[in-house]
Image: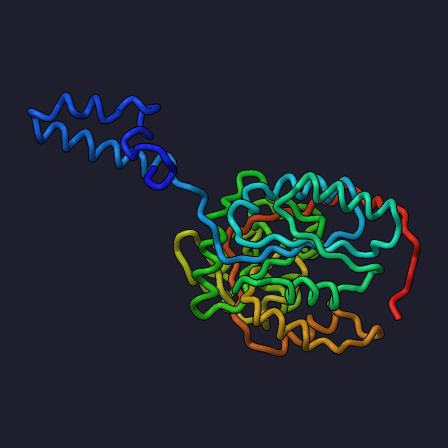
């Protein structure tokens, strides 16, 4: 390709169409031109680089050594598709935990690592990651979500950015096709007889699209906001706040986290759940990318410290 140090006419058909061959057809101008156009076309479709999106992926690492390792391995396409990748190691206060963190970073050199000496909790952990991001979009991942098999990573990221650049405030990225276990909303729905809306609070109505691809025809609060790939939109009143994978605009998520009081007696997720339902943000859900799959909760030994 041009700029790669290689002749632009050598990338198709394993380099067989070089300039020497093309020159043989010079007496037949149309044939020569047709072969050149064909070769340029093959170059463009066969060796396009991975599309990179202005997204910062922030990963929280605390426990689950095997889980984290498998998660990061599944992120190879994700890492190649985003501009920034950060991992926050919490409670890094012993030589064994420091060695663990170093081994992770050595295995995944794409990651920029930051750390805290003790477990600073969700609010401070999320804020530390968001404040470290230099991209306009942010995706925070806890260590128990991996990329689902057959997930269309680039396609879903591109869609999410398009939605966020329009009127959407949050795009859910837990896989709708392979959400993983446990799926509490689905379990609640099944326990209550599998009837429309049964057992699900109004704040969880968007969950129906996980097991019902025509949910919009039965739940008036849901609407299809994109036909291909099919995407549903609704108000945050019907799509509860979640720590599952969600793509946000970075400034939006920064402001959202900052709404939670910096008080150890305030439960981060409970506070945000109530606040989120009182707003009228627009939430979108398409096929998603990530499946929940925790393998272990193994924690490398540390010198336990409590944040003052």
Could you tell whether 29 is left or right of 181 in the image? left
Q: Quadrant of residue 134?
A: bottom right
Q: For the point 72% across and 40% down, which residue is it?
A: 69
Q: For the point 21% across and 21% down, which residue is it?
A: 21
User: Residue 159: x, y in percent?
Assistant: 45, 56
Q: For the point 44% across and 66% down, which residue is it?
A: 165
Q: For the point 61% across and 69% down, which residue is it?
A: 253
Instruction: Work out which residue is located at the far front of the displayed protein and give it.
Output: 5
User: Residue 277: x, y in percent?
Assistant: 63, 74
Please state which of residues 88 and 222 is positioned toward the viewer in this rendering.
88
Q: Quadrant of residue 60?
A: bottom right
Please state which of residues 215 and 229 is positioned toward the viewer in this rendering.
229
Disc tally is 0
User: Residue 199: x, y in percent?
Assistant: 68, 62
Q: Quick check: can you spot residue 206? A: no
Please state which of residues 246 and 196 is positioned toward the viewer in this rendering.
246
Vertical order, 258 against 6 (above or below): below
Give the position of the N terminus as an image quadrant.
top left
User: Residue 120: x, y in percent?
Assistant: 80, 64
Could you tell whether 64 is left or right of 212 in the image? right
Could you tell whether 28 is left or right of 78 in the image? left
Q: Quick check: can you spot residue 123? A: yes
Give the position of the C terminus as an image quadrant.
bottom right
């Amino acid at each position: 390709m041009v700029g790669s140090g290689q002749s632009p006419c050598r990338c198709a058909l394993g380099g067989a169409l070089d300039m020497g061959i093309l020159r043989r057809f010079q007496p037949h101008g149309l044939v020569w031109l047709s072969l050149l156009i064909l070769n340029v076309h093959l170059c463009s479709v066969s060796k396009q680089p991975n599309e990179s999106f202005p997204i910062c992926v922030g990963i929280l690492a605390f426990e689950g050594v095997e889980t984290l390792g498998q998660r990061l391995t599944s992120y190879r396409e994700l890492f190649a598709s985003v501009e920034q990748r950060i991992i926050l190691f919490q409670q890094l206060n012993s030589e064994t935990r420091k060695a663990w963190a170093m081994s992770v970073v050595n295995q995944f050199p794409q990651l920029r690592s930051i750390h805290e000496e003790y477990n600073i909790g969700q609010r401070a952990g999320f804020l530390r990651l968001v404040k470290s991001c230099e991209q306009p979009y942010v995706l925070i991942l806890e260590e128990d979500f991996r990329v689902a098999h057959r997930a269309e990573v680039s396609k879903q990221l591109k869609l999410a950015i398009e939605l966020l650049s329009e009127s959407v405030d949050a795009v859910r990225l837990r896989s709708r096709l392979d959400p993983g276990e446990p799926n509490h909303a689905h379990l609640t729905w099944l326990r209550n007889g599998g009837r429309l809306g049964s057992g699900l609070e109004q704040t969880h109505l968007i969950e129906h699209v996980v097991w019902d691809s025509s949910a919009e025809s039965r739940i008036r609060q849901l609407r299809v906001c994109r036909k291909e790939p099919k995407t549903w939109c609704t108000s945050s009143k019907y799509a509860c706040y979640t720590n599952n994978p969600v793509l946000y605009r970075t400034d939006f998520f920064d402001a959202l986290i900052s709404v939670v009081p910096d008080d150890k007696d305030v439960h981060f997720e409970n506070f945000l759940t109530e606040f989120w339902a009182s707003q009228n943000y627009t939430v979108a859900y398409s096929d998603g990318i990530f499946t929940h799959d925790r393998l272990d909760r193994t924690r490398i030994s540390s010198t336990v410290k409590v944040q003052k």
